[in-house]
Amino acid sequence: MSYKFIKEKLNNGKLVILDGAMGSELEKNGAKMDKNLWCGTCSVEFPELVTKVHEDYIKAGADVITTNTYACTPISMKNYGLEDSIQEFNQKSVEVAKKAIENSKKDIALAGSVSASGSFYKFGTKAMIPGFKEQIKILTEEGVDLIILEAMSSQADIVQTMIECSYKINIPIWLSISCVIDNETNNVMLGYNDTIDSPPEVYEDFEKSLNRFSKLHKGPILIAHSDIGVTGKAIDIAKKNFNGILGAYPNTGYYEKPHWKFADNITPNDYLEYAKSWLKNGVQIIGGCCGLGVEEIKAISVLKK
Ligand SMILES: [Zn+2]
């Protein structure tokens, strides 16, 4: 486990492969999703399965795997009366991921996923700060190699708050944000769309967001949990507005709590073609989010040099 080889790859213009979806792969392997915390309970309830999914991603070619902590945010766990388990769920998630890395005997970096899952926007961003800091602290102390602020689906001021909460952390920080097309203007916006029967959540112009976030955050920015087609458009915008390292891990399908539903419109080979075009456009980190799993990661791993 280390970040050194990732840093070298990124500095030398090489591609880094990130893992793909955790929840949908766990379901495929027989894990039960929790109605509140989705796959967040799996590190404790099905630790072997979580390790197995991490191992599957490593075998598929991932250089970086991500802890199963997206849904284990302190704010969400408190909301469901699980405040006494925050430490345990996050710790256990690091432990099972480390085990997969050890078993692989490969040099793999471990990313700690910190998210805004379960945050209540109506209470303001200030109310979210303790939770963000707590999750960052636990994961860092447990020895992850980097933190991914999985701020996807979040409003711009939540993204900004998460960035600010990461300032004093002395391991690399990556930032993930989502984009969506505004149906009225056809512009690429910060926002997301998880369902097929409701309009997209549209926050602000994606270009404006990128300009704002890149002033505050110096690490890689990844376009995540977004439609594959929109991701390509967002990459074009990012190329003009952001000088740093760019990554992408989009979605396919849609959400129907507590399951991610698959849309069988993208084959692993299709995904490889998209990844090739993004790589050509300067993207250096590619993985998958909801609906893009082990097969897709395996397909894009041929792009590693
Ligand atoms: Zn996703």
Image: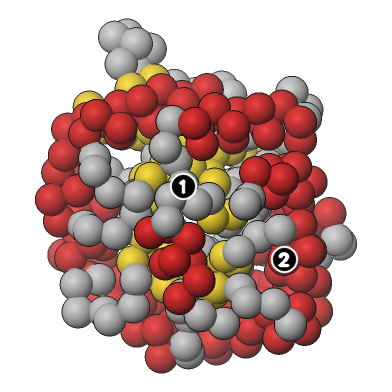
What is the x, y in percent for residue 145?
A: 46, 78
Residue 223 seen: yes
Residue 138 vs 273, above or below: the answer is below
Instruction: Please rate how many residues cluster around mark 1, counting C-alpha atoms within 10 Å: few if below 14, some from 14 to 19, many from 20.
Output: many
**Three-letter residue code for mark 1:** Gln
What is the x, y in percent for residue 243?
A: 24, 43
Residue carrying label 1: 284
Instruction: Give the side of residue 194 with respect to residue 282, left or right.
Output: right
Q: Earlier in the sequence, mark 2 or mark 1?
A: 2
Residue 5 vs 159, above or below: the answer is below
Q: Residue at x 64, y 83 (%)?
A: 98
- What colour scheme has been applied to the protein in the rendered image? secondary structure
Residue 76 seen: no
Helix, strand or loop at label 1? It is: loop
* Residue contact at pointers 2 and 1, CB within 8 angstroms: no
**Three-letter residue code for mark 2:** Ile
What is the x, y in percent for residue 239?
A: 30, 32
Instruction: Give the side of residue 290 with respect to residue 45, left or right.
Output: left
Instruction: Give the side of residue 112 with respect to residue 183, left or right.
Output: right
Q: Nearer the viewer, residue 23 or 113?
A: 113
Residue carrying label 2: 58
Alpha-carbon span between mark 2 and mark 1 = 18 Å
Instruction: Please rate how many residues cluster around mark 2, counting C-alpha atoms within 10 Å: few if below 14, some from 14 to 19, many from 20.
Output: many
Q: So how many labels did they put on this image?
A: 2
Q: Residue at x 48, y 89 (%)?
A: 142
Q: Nearer the viewer, residue 214 or 136?
A: 214
Helix, strand or loop at label 2? It is: helix
Q: Quadrant of residue 251?
A: top right
Instruction: Give the side of residue 103 with respect to residue 107, left or right.
Output: right
